[in-house]
Image (cartoon, rainbow, N blue to C red):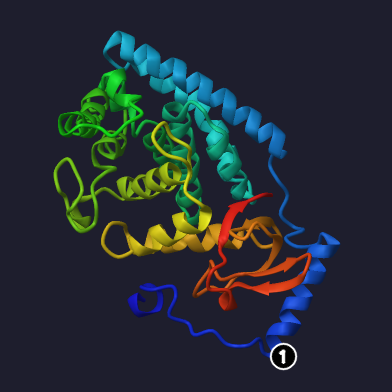
Amino acid sequence: MKNRIGKLNYKPFSPLTIPEIDIIMTQLKKVEDGQLNSTEQRALSKGAINKSINEASVQMKRLFEDIRNNGNLQLETIQEIQTDIAPVLMEAAGNPDVHYLFEQMQASDAYTYNHNIGVGIIATYIGRKLGFSKENLSTLTLAATLHDVGKTRIPESVLGKRGKLTASEYEEMKRHTIYGYELLKDIPGLPPSVALSALQHHEREDGNGYPLGLTGIDIHHHSKIVAIADVFHAMSSHRVYHRAMPFYQVIEQMNRDMFGKFNPEILLLFVTQLMSTLVGKEVMLTNQQKGTIIMIDPYDPLKALLNTSTGIVDLRMEADCRIERIIG
């Protein structure tokens, strides 16, 4: 598998063949007729999903502020998340057009709280694609939503700092993993993976993460999923100290980290599934041209074929042109 996916740019550029052109025209006709993925129906409209996500984020902000003020995490808070917030994340993650999250990520102002919601949705999406049972998926959703709960013990002056953190501030920020574990580990009836995901979501497969420098074999499976969701959402979001990265840079960075930082099987599944949802969707290219994706190369998913106002564009043949953002 490693030879197949270790590098995504190894496939040489070549002109389109007659069979490829036939497939393109078939896909293009489906897009134009609105028939692509016609059997997949959205669980909620985009507007309704966004409204639910925003409401969940506001609720999460209130809960985190309560934890910060009280200095501890109560069982009642866990139950409120499971009852009110988790169903929203499950619903959003089940929507076939999961790309709608990109707009929400980049439009968010309260990053600290929206991040927990975003990571919860992405992790749940991955768990669905991995075929998790209902119980296992529910636990993963809760673990992802609470992965950063330890930040409630980080001084707000550090958490919201716009400039670069000092060495001592960075060390304090890293302690949020331990603080989160301490808040969660003794809550009655809470699955161990919830506390472990708070502790381990910055651990890396090669042992170069924190706080314990664990290697892949010692990292809980839920923690591996939350780690991928955490980094993907962070790179895709506007934050106090940097803007969201362009879509192609996010995917390229994730692919570079596929062997070393993250579990390759989980990350490959996520990237492949994510890119497949974009067929038929409108995107903005780095040259500011808009186009509709009509085909994804499974070996190099960023090198898509698009229908634009000037005709079909093959990104395999455009070395300086990438997908900058998803429009819808």
Q: Residue furthest top?
A: 70
In this rendering, does residue 211 appear at all?
Answer: yes
Number of callouts = 1
Residue 228: percent from left, percent from top: 38, 50
Question: What is the crowding at mark 1: few (fewer than 14 residues within 10 Å), some, or many (at least 20)?
Answer: few
Q: Residue, x 49% and y 85% (percent of image)?
A: 12
Residue 155: percent from left, percent from top: 26, 19
> Tag 1, which secondary structure?
helix
Q: Is residue 22 above or below residue 82?
A: below
Query: Which amino acid, mark 1?
Result: Ile
Q: Residue, x 54% and y 84% (percent of image)?
A: 13
Task: Name the quadrant of the N terminus.
Answer: bottom left
Q: Residue furthest right?
A: 33
Q: Is residue 224 above or below residue 28?
A: above
Q: Nearer the viewer, residue 214 or 191?
A: 214
Q: Residue, x 46% and y 22% (percent of image)?
A: 60
Residue 249: percent from left, percent from top: 46, 57
In this rendering, does residue 270 appear at all?
Answer: no
Q: Name the image quarter holding residue 176.
A: top left
Residue 309: percent from left, percent from top: 79, 65
Q: Residue, x 48% and y 37% (percent of image)?
A: 238
In the displayed structure, does residue 212 sit left or right of residue 100?
left
Q: Is residue 22 above or below residue 45?
A: below
Give the residue pinned by disc 1.
Answer: 18
Q: Name the image quarter holding residue 267.
A: bottom left
